[in-house]
Amino acid sequence: MKQKLTALFTLVFGSIAVYGQFIDVPTTMRTPYGNVKTTNRIYVGTPNYRWWGNRKVKSTDTYNIKVVYKNDSTAKVDGVILLTDSASVILYDSTFTILPRDTREITCSAPGMKKVKGLPTDSTWRFQLSSGSVKAYANLPFTEEAIIALQKDEGELVPFSKELLLEWIGVSTKIVEMVEKGKYLEAIRYYNGQL
């Protein structure tokens, strides 16, 4: 009986620990103006996908990233933008991280894609995915499923919702069909006259 309880205890509580952990990573960032030492807390063991509402977001694509730091120094890295529930981080070289609070902007590019500029917010970068009278913003470049905010003309950014998008651009049955199928960027571009 004791062996069965030990096995059950190990199975139940041992499986809880496999989700990952936070670790402090001391790093030295080389810039033209001298070395900068930082300590970053990163989450190790994150899954490949994150849930944003009912939308699944892949967060392990590698991008060519040009980073402009707050002190105007720049770096070019091939890295992954990892998303957590409250923040995003660029991870490259498996030990070095770049946080939004350390940057003025980043520019991401991928083969066959246009460059997309990301501006830092409190804890993530915000990428503008469309232009025109209605704009979409996301936490990840090139990723329609990561849309987090919308902007109409020069108004305020508002949190993304399918209902709001339909209210703003649902002027034709074709647009409504695109939105219902989850093709948000295609619908926005069609509305803006870019398709």
Image (spheres, helix red, strand yellow):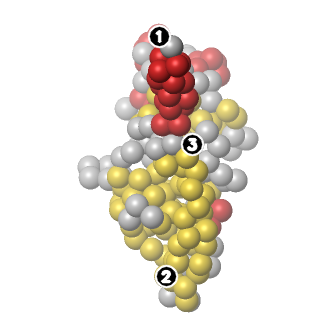
Q: In whole angstroms, how far apart are the C-alphas of marks 3 and 2? A: 26 Å
Instruction: Looking at the image, tell me whether mark 3 or mark 2 is earlier in sequence order.
Output: 2
Q: Amino acid at mark 2?
A: Arg
Residue placed most toward the observer, 117 or 90:
90
Residue placed most toward the observer, 29 or 156:
29
Image spot of residue 4 (x, y percent): 48, 17
Q: Secondary structure at mark 1?
A: helix
Q: Secondary structure at mark 3?
A: loop
Q: In whole angstroms, how far apart are the C-alphas of marks 3 and 1? A: 36 Å
Q: Dot 2: few (<14), some (14–19), or many (≥20) neighbours within 10 Å?
A: few
Task: Give me the residue at 51% from left, 83% from top.
Answer: 31
Task: Give me the residue at 42% from left, 29% from top.
Answer: 186
Tell me: residue 110, above or below residue 171. Answer: below
Residue placed most toward the observer, 168 or 64:
64
Q: Dot 3: few (<14), some (14–19), or many (≥20) neighbours within 10 Å?
A: some
**Marks 3 and 2: CB-CB under 8 Å?**
no
Tell me: residue 75, above or below residue 55. Answer: below
Q: Which mark is in front, 3 or 1?
A: 3
Viewer can see residue 133: no
Viewer can see residue 39: yes
Q: Quadrant of residue 79?
A: bottom left
Residue wearing tag 3 = 84
Q: Amino acid at mark 1?
A: Thr
Q: Secondary structure at mark 2?
A: strand
Task: Give me the residue at 62% from left, 17% from top.
Answer: 163
Q: In whole angstroms, how far apart are the C-alphas of marks 2 and 1? A: 54 Å
Q: Amino acid at mark 3?
A: Thr
Residue wearing tag 2 = 30
Residue wearing tag 1 = 173
Instruction: Looking at the image, tell me whether mark 3 or mark 1 is earlier in sequence order.
Output: 3
Instruction: From the viewer's perspective, tell me whether residue 46 is left or right of residue 167.
Output: left
Image spot of residue 143 (x, y percent): 43, 38
